[in-house]
Amino acid sequence: MEVERIHLDVIDSTNTYAKEHASEFDPKKITLITADIQTGGRGRFPNRSWISKRGNLHMSLVLSISPNPNLAQVLALSALEVVKLPIQIKWPNDLIFEDKKLAGVLVETTSTGAILGMGMNVNTPIETDQKTISLKELSGKPWDLNQLSLAIAKQFVRNADRDFGELPFEEHLAYKNEFITCDTGRGKIEGLLLGIGPDGHLQVEVDGKIQSIYSGDISHLRML
Ligand code: BTN
């Protein structure tokens, strides 16, 4: 599927722009919206903003297909495959290096499909209460944001055509065989992270039983 780009200098949020304009885009293409700066970048949790400085990646993909719960995970994997650095996926869809956050994905649905937004710290270091890292710090060189966003969008198109269970998501999973706690929004689950099921759910061993978790926020506790 062809990717068509719309670039904006400054916008509140590429996801919000994508939602407001979704019906105007060609449903036979994937629209990639990028912005140099976001003044109201939004994070995955309602009370979290995404600090969006010039030099970093702010992109949204507008999809006219029925939203599949794994698409955000597929986008995270696609970005990891493009940058080719030893980063990992913190389930469900953060990219991290040694507990420091590089990128995150915010998925939202529209009446016509889904919006997948990704923010990545690329050339400009970010200071927040979370530990963060940038691609430039990891690779020692600056990155071209136009090339990077297009390469991620194209890799996403290739991966989205495959069954989720066939993708090498688990190979890049952080904290595998380590103890984690997962805040599911309905309580916390503490156990050994075994891996990912073919449906993208997190498999955690708790008191000898396997629990399959479909959404949540994980924190690392300790090695086995
Ligand atoms: C997270 O909390 O980890 C998800 C962050 C997602 C940020 C991106 S930046 C582009 C798009 N527009 C937004 O307002 N948010 C997403």
Image (cartoon, rainbow, N blue to C red):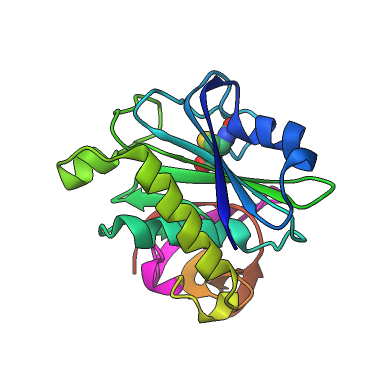
- The x and y percentages for residue 57 are 42, 36
**115 sits to left or right of 121:** right
> Can you see residue 52?
yes
* Residue at x 47% of width, y 69% of height: 193
Snapshot quadrant of residue 182: bottom right
Ligand 1 is found in which quarter of the picture?
Answer: top right
Rendered position, 173 above or below 15? below
Position of the C terminus, as image quadrant, is bottom left
Snapshot quadrant of residue 33: top right
Quick one: 5 or 101, which is closer to the camera? 5
**11 sits to left or right of 139:** right
Q: Which stretch did the figure color magenta? A: 170-190
* Residue at x 28% of width, y 43% of height: 135
- The x and y percentages for residue 49 are 55, 27
- The x and y percentages for residue 84 are 28, 60
Position of the N terminus, as image quadrant, is bottom right
Snapshot quadrant of residue 56: top left
175 inside magenta stretch: yes
114 inside magenta stretch: no
Q: Which residue is at the far left?
A: 140
> Can you see residue 208?
no
